[in-house]
């Protein structure tokens, strides 16, 4: 038996929410991912491991994504010294300076 139209029925081709989701509204999955990533990066064991991976140069791209979800997109930094000052440093010197910066956290 076919369904009868009522005053609350939608016309063919029209959805129940024609304006859609409000821009900027987070989905349930996004909220859950942010919560999981936040718990992960706030774990002291994870942070110790991350520190060691950064010093060793073995932190992968996934680390950046996890931190992005947990704490937000990092602020872009601009080199304030002479142009190309970092390129004049050796890899060992860059690692040493990174290690010093991380120990201050």
Image (cartoon, helix red, strand yellow):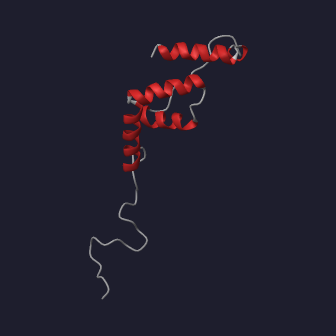
Residue 83, horizontal then vertical, whole percent: 70, 14
In the image, farthest residue toward the bottom: 1
Q: Is residue 72 visible?
A: yes
Residue 22 visible in the current orientation: no
Q: Position of residue 32 (x, y in %)?
A: 37, 45
Q: Is residue 79 left or right of residue 36?
A: right
Who's the residue at 30% across and 82% down the image? Answer: 3
Q: Residue at x 45, y 33 (%)?
A: 72
Q: Residue at x 53, y 34 (%)?
A: 64
Residue, far left: 7
Residue at the spot x=54%, y=27% of the render? 53
Q: Is residue 58 above or below residue 31?
A: above
Which quadrant of the view contains residue 54? top right
Residue 26, relative to residue 85: is it above or below? Answer: below
- Number of callouts: 0
Q: Nearer the viewer, residue 101 or 45?
A: 45
Estimate the x, y position of residue 93 in percent, counting from the top left: 65, 13
Q: Quadrant of the C terminus?
A: top left
Residue 44, compared with residue 61, is above or below; it is above
Q: Is residue 73 left or right of residue 8?
A: right
Residue 55, x across and y down, in percent: 57, 22
């Amino acid at each position: 038996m076919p369904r009868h139209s009522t005053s609350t029925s939608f016309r063919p081709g029209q959805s129940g929410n024609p304006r859609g989701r409000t821009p900027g509204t987070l989905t349930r999955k996004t909220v859950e991912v942010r919560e999981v990533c936040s718990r992960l990066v706030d774990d002291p064991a994870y942070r110790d491991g991350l520190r060691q991976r950064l010093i060793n140069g073995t932190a992968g791209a996934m680390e950046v994504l996890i931190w992005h979800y947990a704490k937000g997109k990092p602020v872009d930094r601009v080199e304030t010294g002479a142009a190309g000052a970092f390129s004049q440093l050796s890899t060992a010197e860059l690692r040493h300076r990174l290690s010093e910066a991380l120990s201050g956290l």
